[in-house]
Image: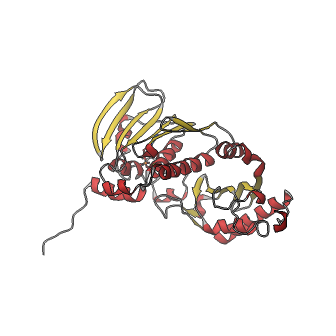
């Protein structure tokens, strides 16, 4: 029998990996925003055209990259963020897989301009389906501008699978909001087809929430605060009378990363026990700090699910912290005849 096994060429491997990392324009948005944050940016601008289908551009004023790194960053498993497997348990960055740019470049036209602080000129590199088309010196401010054009140009099935511009824009805004809410110390803006949608100045958690969801939000927020040995909880829950009929403003952040957790959501809902009308969902913006040793965020490529060491303890702490806050703010049970 002849040998039939071959290693896949890089561009094929990248395209397969891209299937996991990049589902839609909003996935690209998330990766690029996170890279800008990891680069230490204090000002990040997101610009999209046609819901990100034709253009997604993120500009940051972060550290920038050298000429060589600007090429290397498109290689798979190329990262400046971890070196050893142990580092996975001490993560201080959003990224660590070294997969995003390689994946994105495999399925779009990418143009990256970047300059290190103190350099006279920067470098501009153009990539087309992992093929480097050109790299040249360029004039650009300190930091990085990544433009991703024509997403899925080489995978028609994926492109056709994208939803309407309205739906895809919603996904992009969701992703943008999640990132913006967890990093109030960074200024963010979002433009869609040339129109300004968000302009978020540097602020604190409360003010950022208000800037994202509107001035009326301010009076709805009840602060939550608790520090224990394994967990620190900060943030806000919405007063029960403002609970919504649809799940909307429900956010958990663990170590400044947005996560989904039906289990912790249950803890919050349990804390509202007796205060909510039936089929009403409380708003919450909860920022959890946990020793990175106690969590594993590597269970899913998009990192929105994480594994906790001691879920039951977290549940109990969270529920009691919220109960306490609601009690302090004298939130009375809502009786049906009051409405
Ligand atoms: P990861 O973020 O997991 O390391 P990426 O593919 O997203 O993988 O990025 C690869 C590398 O490129 C990063 O580790 C970083 O060194 C560099 N990089 C990416 N985006 C930026 C940026 N906006 N500014 C500076 N460096 C960047
Ligand atoms: Mg990254």
7 or 325, nearer to the observer? 325
Is the image coloured rainbow, by chain, by secondary structure, or in one colour? secondary structure
313 or 200, nearer to the observer? 200
Corner quadrant of residue 292 = bottom right
Give the percent coordinates (x, y) of residue 223: 77, 53
- Name the outermost residue toward the bottom: 1
Quick check: which quadrant has ligand 1? Answer: top left
- Name the outermost residue toward the left: 1
Give the percent coordinates (x, y) of residue 99: 40, 53
Q: Residue at x 39, y 43 (%)?
A: 54
Residue 3 appears left or right of 208: left
**From this viewpoint, is residue 38 visible?**
yes
**From this viewpoint, is residue 81 visible?**
no
Locate the C terminus and report the quarter of the image it occupies. bottom right
246 versus 46 height, above or below: below
Corner quadrant of residue 16 = bottom left
Give the percent coordinates (x, y) of residue 177: 58, 48
Q: Residue at x 66, y 46 (%)?
A: 213
């Amino acid at each position: 029998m002849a040998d039939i096994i071959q290693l896949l060429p890089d561009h094929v491997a990248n395209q397969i990996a891209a299937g996991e990392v990049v589902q839609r324009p909003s996935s690209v948005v998330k990766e690029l925003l996170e890279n800008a944050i990891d680069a230490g940016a204090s000002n990040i601008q997101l610009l999209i055209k046609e819901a990100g289908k034709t253009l997604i551009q993120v500009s940051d004023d972060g550290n920038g990259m050298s000429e060589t790194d600007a090429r290397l960053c498109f290689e798979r498993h190329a990262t400046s963020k971890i070196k050893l497997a142990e580092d996975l348990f001490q993560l201080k960055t959003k990224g660590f897989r070294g997969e995003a740019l390689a994946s994105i470049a495999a399925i779009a036209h990418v143009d990256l301009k970047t300059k290190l602080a103190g350099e006279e000129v920067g470098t501009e590199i153009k990539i087309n389906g992992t093929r480097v088309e050109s790299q040249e010196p360029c004039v650009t401010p300190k930091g990085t501008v990544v433009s991703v054009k024509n997403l899925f140009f080489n995978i028609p099935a994926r492109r056709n699978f994208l939803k309407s511009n309205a739906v895809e824009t919603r996904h992009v805004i969701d992703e943008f909001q999640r990132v913006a809410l967890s990093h109030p110390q960074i200024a963010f803006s979002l433009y869609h087809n040339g129109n300004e949608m968000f302009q978020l100045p540097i602020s604190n958690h409360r003010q950022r929430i208000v800037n994202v969801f509107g001035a009326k939000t301010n009076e709805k927020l009840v602060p939550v605060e608790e520090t224990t040995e394994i967990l620190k909880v900060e943030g806000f829950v919405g007063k029960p009378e403002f609970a919504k009929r649809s799940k909307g403003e429900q956010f958990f952040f663990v170590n400044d990363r947005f996560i989904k957790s039906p289990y912790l959501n249950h803890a919050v809902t349990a804390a509202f026990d007796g205060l909510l009308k039936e089929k009403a969902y409380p708003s919450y913006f909860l920022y959890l700090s946990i020793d990175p040793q106690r969590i594993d965020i590597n269970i899913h490529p998009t990192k929105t699910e994480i594994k906790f060491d001691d879920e039951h303890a977290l549940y109990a702490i969270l529920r009691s912290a919220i109960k306490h806050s609601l009690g302090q703010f004298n939130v009375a049970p809502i009786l049906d005849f009051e409405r």
